[in-house]
Image: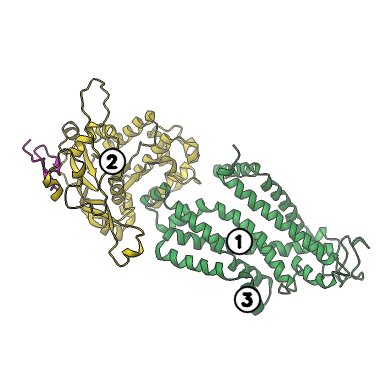
Amino acid sequence: MEKIKKVGVRLAGMVRSSMQLRMGLIFFALVLLVVIFAPSLAPFDPYDLGDDLLVPPGTNGHWLGTTNMGQDVLSMIIYGSRASLAIGIVSALISGVIGTLLGAFAGFYGGKVDKVVSEIINIFLMIPTFFLILIIVALFGSSMINVMLVIGLTSWPSNARMMRVQAMSIKERTFVKSAISMGETKRQVLFKYIIPNGLFPIIANTTMGVAKAILTEASLSFLGLGDPNVISWGQMIYEGKQYLATGWWMSTFAGLFIMLIVMIFYMIGDGLNFALNPKMKKI
Amino acid sequence: MPDAVKAPVIKAVGVKRYYKQRGGSLLSFGRKPRMIQAVDGVDFELYEGEIFGVIGESGCGKSTLGRLLIRLEEPSEGDIYFRGESSKALMKKDPKKFHRMVQAVFQNPFDTFTPNDTIGEIMMRPLRLHGIGKSDEERRAMCEKALEDGGLKPAADFLGRFPHELSGGQLQRISILRSMLLEPLFLVADEPVSMLDVSVRAEIIHMLQDLCASRRTAIMLISHDIAVVRYVSQRVAVMYLGRIVEMGDTDTIIQNPMHPYTQALISNCSSIDPDEDKQAIEIQGEPPSPINPGPGCYFANRCFKACEKCFKSYPPMRTMKDGRVVSCHFATGDE
């Protein structure tokens, strides 16, 4: 109990120390509310094909206009936040977990393990990731789960590199030596001492990873490789692009919201980076 | 030696630790990598309830020796026997049992504990690891008792705190208490007071002495502070460049050092008596490189007594009349 309280105090201090982090978290809370209450917030059913086809914003209660099929753009954006957020968070988590584990293994065990993992990391960094994603989605279909997996499985190297360096420096510290001399096994040292103490930069990086994943998903959808059965913002831009001349509102608003959410996650990530770095703290 | 009849708790036989030299140019390709001798053949014995001091200058291998004893590193050659059992065999067979027998206290108390855990979790961890105590409540009670006995009151309050909320002296006491919870045979204290304020050094030293006396734990105190070693340890070893040059009863050695290096070391030690007439022996130069230090005595190039013989062969360890061992050509035992 005491521990939870103290961690809470520490988190509160972190939030207070960075304006960016605070703003990011407030906006993120708003987005989260939209995601949860989408059904009651949306004025129309986004899948409902209404009679107003491609009407401009403001007509007949369609605040942001309708699509060529008569769907309400605002409702689509509200529901689309679910897909974008889910893809962003899940794929960033996948990349965070894989990156942390592989990086920590490499950094802690060193030697041959390190060499092999480092080479794998280098290979993944060399691959033009987006084209790999394109090929995989084209080959295995573009369901939402595939998209999440593919983004997660290709974006872990930056996390792994970071964690590797963390593990390499933490394993030299006295508390690791004292844990070993106390009788902890290597695996216990890795999971109880190295990873928890080296995780903070990875958390900041993963938050930024959410933004990147949302962008990647939007790019995929824009190229027509998103999940066609799910409304997502990228999908909306893709469908709206042929109507840009006659119905600019279809793509534009979805694009704006992508920008917004990416900014929110960058703010959180950057703010966390700042709050967790003691050197950058104000005196 | 008070317990000379008894079997030693620890017996180190020809312990050596080499490191491969890193890097090297392209030209050295194919050549044998050069070895750095951090610990170069150390033999000693330690008895129950004894504090054994190890002194020497920076880089002489005393900390490496400590790490070898607690098996953070493996000796390149030689072995250490705990109650007659080879540590190599023991580590293979039952590493937990080994770690329970041998504990360590480190130099930097601020970094000895993981910053994310409370003192309670930190202290209960070794008990849980080794299956001591039936329940967490019982373990907690044991930790509380240990803290109270160690003078950290109220114990319950300390258990809920985080390491960064405590002072260096408190942390170092907790470090010692935690090691002692496992009731080890042997404790390595590697510069346990060098990072602490002078005002709390005495407390820590007394704590080690008390524990040593009450639990009969053998303690190896590694330090470059001769005063501390002189104050607590019954026997002392002086190391120079990976080897023990002189070893014996602390008082005999400090009062009447035989090896020129020990003489220089002790003559340069400040005295509390301003009138004491003491001539500090100056030694020039650096210790030779630990890579292939050559056939002669390692100290020869800095020694004020050195003669031709010293550069040709390394002096053997000789036991003197008063029980000490010295490795110097000039210490003949007739003095």
Task: Measure the alpha-carbon separation of dots 1 and 2.
Answer: 50 Å
> Which SS class for mark 2?
loop
Magenta segment includes A202: no
Circle 3 SS class: helix
The disc placed on residue A136 is: 3
Q: Specify whether B197 is left or right of A23.
A: left
The residue wearing badge 2 is B57
Q: Chain of mark 1?
A: A
Q: Secondary structure at mark 1?
A: helix
Toward the viewer: B263 or B62? B263
Could you tell me the amino acid type at mark 1? Leu
Report the magenta stretch's main SS: loop
Label 3 close to label 1 by CB (< 8 Å): no
Q: Amino acid at mark 3?
A: Ile
Instruction: Report the side of A238 relative to B74 (left or right).
Output: right
The image shows a total of numbered marks equal to 3
Local crowd size for mark 2, using a 10 Å CA cut-off: few (<14), some (14–19), many (≥20): some
Asked whether the viewer can see residue B46, the reply is no
Task: Compute the Cα span from label 3 to label 1.
Answer: 20 Å
Q: Is residue B290 above or below residue A76?
A: above
Quarter holding residue A278:
top right
Please name the residue shown 62% across and 62% down the image: A92
Closer-to-camera residue (A220/B203)? A220
Which chain did the image draw in green? Answer: A
For residue A187, say whether it is visible: yes
Neighbourhood count class around disc 1 (C-alpha, 10 Å): few under 14, some 14–19, many 20 upward: many
Between marks 1 and 2 in the image, the one whose residue lies nearer the viewer? 2
Nearest-to-viewer mark from 3 and 2: 2
Q: Which residues are magenta?
A: B313-335
